[in-house]
Image (cartoon, rainbow, N blue to C red):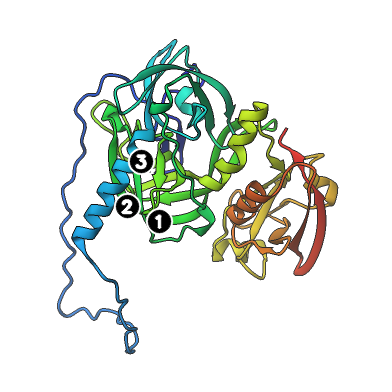
């Protein structure tokens, strides 16, 4: 990594830390955290407890469970997919790092995260068979945190993984992650899809300060740790539905490395399928740009302070000067409210084209998956209690 970032990118909120589940130093020291279970609360017997209204419970789902079948399926997925998952070792001016990646085609292209290869002077790709080869970074994308590596490897070593459709992924669906956490090569973990359409800061800085947003991320509780970054997140068909990128954690190892807390994020494969072919062909990918800063969601208290009739939508905090949103006439907040730092008067985006916008992530995911610079979109907003419609011509991110 260069001097701007450590091998683990850290996004700090008040109490939570989001960090990339990627590179680690070669010193894999013992790690762990306090796992003591807190005592269950004890209620006084004379204290009445609130009860839900009496009602007939819904019938339970009928799900055939066959432990042996599931076990056999997981073994099959691992044996089918693992040959195409690689370990990526890097040497930078500040030390070494390790991440994951996977083969995407028979031409020797490897996909991983940008932050895995950032600042690398030397790069080695290790295959599960034991074969090792030098790799060259041919294109990177800081907006979604993607990188493409080219290797010159025998055809027998190249096992491209099948790509799924992340739009078809459902919350609750079982998923598998394969990678190299803490340098433990070819490690497989299992979990579920916890949520869809999440957003994180990208790695690319905006001209006005801060960072652009990355959208359409899949949240999972499959165990992801440093070294997993760039590895595949798979469905039960063995198809890649995402690329593991980051974890949210409040705990660290003895050596200071972040540890999994059950909240991980993966770049959706539909973003990858849209971006990577253009990266291979042109060396860069331009994302559509609307030019607004918006709150991911607003609470009821914030809704009341803003004087809005609904809390459903993406509330525009600021509009960048000269942006498509500015040219179309969208507005950000300008008037102080009773809540510190919250300005009223901004537009509430409730629809883009024919798609409803419940939160900012809906808008961002739609643009990233379906639109390009030069395309026109129609947004519906609420302003002063009235619904208005604007047409915007998208530009590329500056």
Q: CA distance from mark 1 to mark 3?
A: 23 Å
State the residue in front, 259 or 168. 168
Q: Is residue 6 left or right of residue 271?
A: left
The image position of residue 333, as x and y in percent, is 71, 52
For label 2, the residue is 191
- Residue 325 in sight: yes
Disc 1 residue crowd, few under 14, some 14–19, many 20+, Cα 10 Å: some
Q: CA distance from mark 1 to mark 2?
A: 9 Å
Q: Are marks 3 and 2 in contact (CB under 8 Å)?
A: no
Give the answer, above or below, for where 58 lies relative to 195: below
Q: Are marks 1 and 2 in contact (CB under 8 Å)?
A: yes
> Which quadrant of the figure has residue 253?
top left
State the residue in front, 149 or 311. 149
> Which quadrant of the figure has residue 57?
bottom left
State the residue in front, 321 or 232. 232
Disc 3 vs disc 2: which is toward the camera? 3
Disc 1 vs disc 2: which is toward the camera? 2
For label 1, the residue is 194
For label 3, the residue is 81
Q: Residue at x 71, y 36 (%)?
A: 397
Q: Residue at x 49, y 35 (%)?
A: 104
């Amino acid at each position: 990594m260069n001097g701007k970032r450590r091998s683990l990118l850290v996004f700090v909120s008040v109490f939570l830390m989001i960090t990339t589940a990627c590179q680690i130093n070669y010193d894999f020291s013992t790690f762990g955290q306090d796992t003591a279970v807190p005592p269950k609360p004890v209620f006084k017997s004379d204290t009445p407890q609130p009860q839900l209204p009496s009602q007939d419970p819904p019938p339970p789902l009928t799900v055939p469970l066959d432990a042996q079948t599931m076990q056999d399926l997981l073994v099959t997925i691992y044996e089918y997919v693992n040959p195409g998952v690689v370990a990526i070792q890097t040497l930078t001016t500040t030390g070494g790092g390790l991440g994951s990646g996977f083969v995407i085609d028979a031409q020797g292209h490897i996909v991983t995260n940008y932050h895995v290869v950032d600042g690398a002077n030397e790069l080695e790709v290790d295959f599960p068979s034991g074969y090792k080869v030098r790799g060259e970074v041919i294109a990177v994308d800081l907006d979604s945190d993607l990188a493409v590596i080219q290797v010159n490897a025998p055809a027998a070593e190249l096992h491209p993984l099948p790509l799924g459709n992340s739009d078809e992924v459902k919350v609750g669906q079982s998923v598998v992650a394969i990678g190299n956490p803490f340098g433990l090569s070819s490690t497989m973990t299992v979990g579920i899809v916890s949520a869809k359409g999440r957003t994180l800061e990208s790695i690319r800085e905006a001209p006005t300060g801060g960072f652009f947003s990355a959208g359409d991320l899949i949240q999972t509780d499959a165990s992801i740790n440093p070294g997993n970054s760039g590895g595949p997140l798979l469905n039960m068909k063995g198809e890649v539905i995402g690329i593991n990128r980051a974890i949210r954690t409040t705990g660290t190892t003895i050596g200071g490395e972040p540890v999994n807390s059950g909240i991980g994020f993966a770049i959706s494969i539909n973003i990858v399928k849209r971006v990577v072919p253009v990266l291979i062909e042109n060396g860069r990918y331009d994302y559509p740009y609307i030019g607004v800063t918006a709150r991911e969601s607003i609470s009821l208290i914030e809704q009341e302070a803003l004087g809005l009739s609904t809390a459903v939508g993406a509330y525009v905090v600021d509009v960048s000067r000269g942006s498509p949103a500015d040219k179309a006439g969208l507005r950000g907040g300008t008037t102080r409210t009773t809540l510190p730092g919250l300005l009223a008067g901004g537009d509430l985006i409730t629809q883009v084209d024919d798609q409803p916008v419940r939160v900012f992530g809906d808008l961002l995911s739609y643009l990233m998956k379906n639109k390009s610079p030069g395309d026109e979109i129609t947004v519906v907003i609420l302003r002063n209690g009235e619904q208005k419609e604007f047409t915007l011509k998208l530009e590329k991110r500056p």
